[in-house]
Amino acid sequence: MNNAVIQFPLPQNEPVKAYLKGSPERVALEAELERQYNTVLDIPLIIGGKEIRAGNTGKVVCPHEHGHVLATFHKAGEKEVKMAIDAAMKAREEWSRTPWTTRAAIVLKCAELLATKYRPIMNAACMLGQSKNFYQAEIDSACETIDFFRYNVHYASKIYSMQPKNGATFLDQTEYRPLEGFILAVTPFNFTSIASNLCMTPVLMGNVALWKPSTTATLSNYYLMQLYKEAGLPDGVINFLPGSGALIGEVATSSKWFSGIHFTGSTATFKTLWKQACANLDAYVSYPRLVGETGGKDFIFVHPSADVQAVATAAFCGAFEFQGQKCSAASRMYIPKSLWPAVLKQMKQFASEVKMGTVMDPGNFINAVIDEKSWDNIDGYLRYAEQSKDAKIVLGGGRDKSVGYFVEPTVIETTDPHFKSMEEEIFGPVLTVYPYDDDKVWEAVKLCDTTSPYGLTGSVFGLDRLEVEKISEALSYAAGNFYINDKPTGAVVGMQPFGGARASGTNDKAGG
Ligand code: NAD
C-alpha cells in the first residue's frame, strides 16, 4: 500500500538553450532537421492507442517552402469521432481512479523526455511545420511545454491539498473528481506548448480527452502523442483527431458525455463551439466547463515621457517575432507625435538588420506566416492600407507567396484611430500606429481602452511613474496580461499566468 505524502515543490523554469554553432544541442537539432526534412510521414488518427488510417487525407508542408511536403495526415470523419468518444470513456474507467501521484509521475516523465530525447524532435517539427526559427521553437515546443508539465504538477498538488477543516469528532475531506465525461481539446497552430497544455492539464487531473489539433501544427502535435505514449500515458486517455474542426466540434459537442472544452484559437471559433454547447445543453449529463483563450488586438501605449530606444525595441520584437503570430503580438500602437519620428527611425534601422527566409538558416529573424489563407488575409489588409487616404505604409509592406508565405515586418501609420487595422486582429507581422497630439494623452488612453472588443495583452511605456500608474489603472480591463516598459509578448509559466478577458477569452490563466 502506498501511503506516502509526496511533495511537488515549485520547479525552476527550463533554461533556454543557445544553439551556438557546434554546441551539442545545435548538432542534434541540425541532424533532426535534416531527418524530418527528408522524411514524408503518414500521420494516422490515434484512437484508443490504435493507429487508424481513415483514407481521407491532407498534406503538411513547410510554410517557408510550401512545395515541400513533410507528411500526409488522415482526417477524422463522424465515425472516428464517435469511436474516439467510446475509447475515451472506456479509458476513463481506469484513469479517473489512477492515483494522482501516478498521473503526476507520467506528466513529469513527459517533461524529462522533452528536455532530453524529444527536444530536437519537437523543435525540428515545430520549425519545419510551423515556420519558427531556432529560438522561437526552443522557447515554445521545448521550454514552455516542459514548464507547463512541471508547474502543473506543482499546482495540482496545491489544489489537492486544499482541504476543509476537521474537528475532534469529525473528519471532512474534499474529493477533486475528474469530470464525468470527456474534454474536447481544440488547439491552435501557433504554440505547441498550448496544444500540449490544453490536453495534458485536464488529463493530469484525471480527465480523458479528444484532441483536435490544428491542421497546420499536425506534425509537431503528432510527435507529442508519441512522447505521451513513451512517458506511459495509457491508451485512450488522449485520442488524436486531425481533421475538420467544424465536423469534429459538432459531433463531439452533441455527445451526452461532452463535459468541457479546453480551447485556444480565434474568437469566432470559440463562440461557435459555445453556441453548439448551449444548443445541446439538455442532452448532457453535466453542465460543460467552457474554457477558451481567443483573439487579441494587443496594444502598446506610449506616454510622452517614454524612452525612445525601449519603445522601438519592444515594438519591433513585440510585433514581428514569429511573424506577429503570437496571440499577444503588438498590433496597434498609440504614440505621441513628438516621439514617433525617432521611434520609426530606430525601427527602420532594426528592419535593415534582420533577414527573412527559411528556418534552416538561423540568421533569419523572420520566417513565413502559417499558410496561404493567412497570407491572403494579411495581403488584404495591406492592400486596403495602400489604397486608403487615412493610412500609409511607412515600413516594409513587401510580400511574396511564390515559394513560401513571406510578409516583411510592416508598419502602417494612420491618422484615423479607428482605422480598420487598428481594430481588427490580423495575425501577421503588421503593426498599425496612431500618433497622437502630445497634449491629448487622456483622449488617447480612452481610445486605446475602447477601440477593440478584445482584452488580451497590452503595455504602457513611460518614465513618469505617477502618470504610468494612472494610465495602467485606466486600462485595467483592456488587457489580461499587462506590461510596463516591456513588450506585450513573452509570458513565462509561473511568472506571468496568461489569459485575457472581454472577447479574448475566459481568462482562466494558463501557467498559474
Ligand atoms: P482557429 O480558431 O482558426 O483554430 C483553432 C482550432 O479550432 C484549430 O484546431 C481549428 O482546426 C479548430 N476549428 C476551426 N473551426 C472550428 C469549428 N467550427 N469547430 C471546432 N473547431 C474548429 O485559430 P488559429 O488560426 O489556429 O489560431 C490563431 C488564433 O488563436 C488567433 O485569433 C489568436 O489570437 C488565437 N490565440 C489565442 C491565444 C490566447 O491565449 N488568447 C493563444 C494562441 C492563439
Image (spheres, helix red, strand yellow):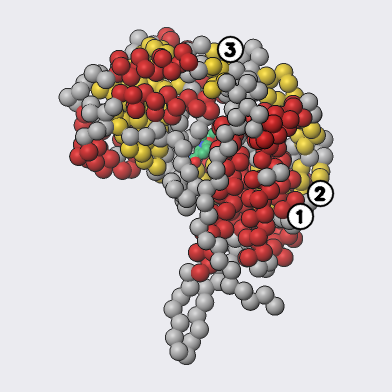
The first of marks 2 and 1 along the sequence is: 2
Residue with the mark numbered 3: 400
> Residue 101's image quarter?
bottom right
Could you give the CA–CA distance between mark 2 and mark 1, rounded to whole angstroms? 8 Å
Name the element at disc 2. strand
Could you give the CA–CA distance between mark 2 and mark 3, rounded to whole angstroms? 41 Å
Spot occupied by residue 197 in the image (x, y as percentages of width and height): 58, 48
User: Residue drawn 62% across and 45% down?
Assistant: 196
Compared to residue 84, the image places residue 167 above or below, namely: below
User: Residue drawn 31% across and 43% down?
Assistant: 476
Ligand 1 image-quadrant field: top right
User: Residue drawn 56% across and 17% down?
Assistant: 356
Asked if labels 1 and 2 touch by Cβ distance under 8 angstroms, the answer is yes
Left or right: residue 110 versus residue 188 is right
Count neighbours of disc 1 (C-alpha within 10 A) and say few if under 14, some if 14 to 19, many if 20 or more. Answer: some
Q: Is mark 3 within 8 Å of ligand 1?
A: no
Compared to residue 164, the image places residue 311 above or below, namely: above
Count neighbours of disc 2 (C-alpha within 10 A) and say few if under 14, some if 14 to 19, many if 20 or more. Answer: few
Spot occupied by residue 134 in the image (x, y as percentages of width and height): 60, 30
Spot occupied by residue 435 in the image (x, y as percentages of width and height): 28, 20
> Residue 386's image quarter?
top left
- Name the amino acid type tagged 2: Lys
Compared to residue 99, the image places residue 321 above or below, namely: above
User: Residue drawn 68% across and 20% down?
Assistant: 66
Residue with the mark numbered 1: 235
Left or right: residue 265 versus residue 485 is right
Name the element at disc 1. loop
Compared to residue 232, the image places residue 160 above or below, namely: below
Residue with the mark numbered 2: 50
